[in-house]
Amino acid sequence: MVLVKASHEAAKAFDARLLTLATGAFGFSIAFVAQFAKDPSGDEWLFAAWASFGATALLTLASFLVSDWRIREAIRDVDDLLKKATPRSDGWQRKLIFIINSASIILFMIGVSTLAVFAWINLE
């Protein structure tokens, strides 16, 4: 039970941190443009960063939702096992959560990379 709780807390912390990083990076990029890039060039890099950070935030929120679905399904599975019934879950939510979280990480890295390119172009 302790390991299950630790795993749940780690997943929750991961999602919260990723959401904080994505929204913070978006805010940082706005401040960067306002302070340092008065006449920015390479706008496509900035827009790609914003799109990546926005998608990261949306996917992280989706991960929260799917995780909640998975927890409810796991509770039903345990209830079914206690009643000696066949569990209903096939674990598709776990797979979806993994895919969503992986996509979130990749999009965040793309956002950071494209923002770095935009900053480099505008600080020369």
Image (spheres, grey):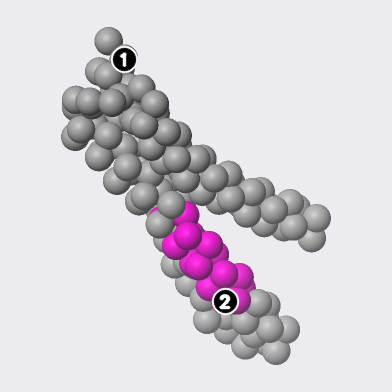
Q: Is residue 102 visible?
A: no
- Spatial separation of the CA atoms under disc 2 and disc 1: 51 Å
Query: Residue 15 location, x and y as percent?
Result: 55, 51
Q: Residue at x 25, y 39 (%)?
A: 48
Does 88 sit left or right of 116 as displayed?
right
Query: Residue 123 location, x and y as percent?
Result: 31, 14
Residue identified by numbered label 2: 73
In the rendered structure, does residue 72 fall within the stretch colored magenta? yes
Q: Residue at x 45, y 40 (%)?
A: 27
- Viewer-proximal residue among 73 and 90: 73
Say what amino acid the circle numbered 1 marks.
Leu
Placement of 22 over or under 88, stated as above or below:
above
Placement of 3 over or under 66, stated as above or below:
above
Does 63 sit left or right of 53 as displayed?
right
Placement of 48 over or under 10, stated as above or below:
above
Residue identified by numbered label 1: 123
Q: Secondary structure at mark 1?
A: helix
The residue segment tinted magenta is 59-74
- Viewer-proximal residue among 62 and 88: 62
Placement of 95 over or under 79, stated as above or below:
above
In the rendered structure, does residue 93 fall within the stretch colored magenta? no
User: How many residues crowd around disc 1 within 10 Å: few (fewer than 14), some, or many (20 or more)?
Assistant: few
Residue projecting furthest to the right: 2
Count of numbered circles on the image: 2
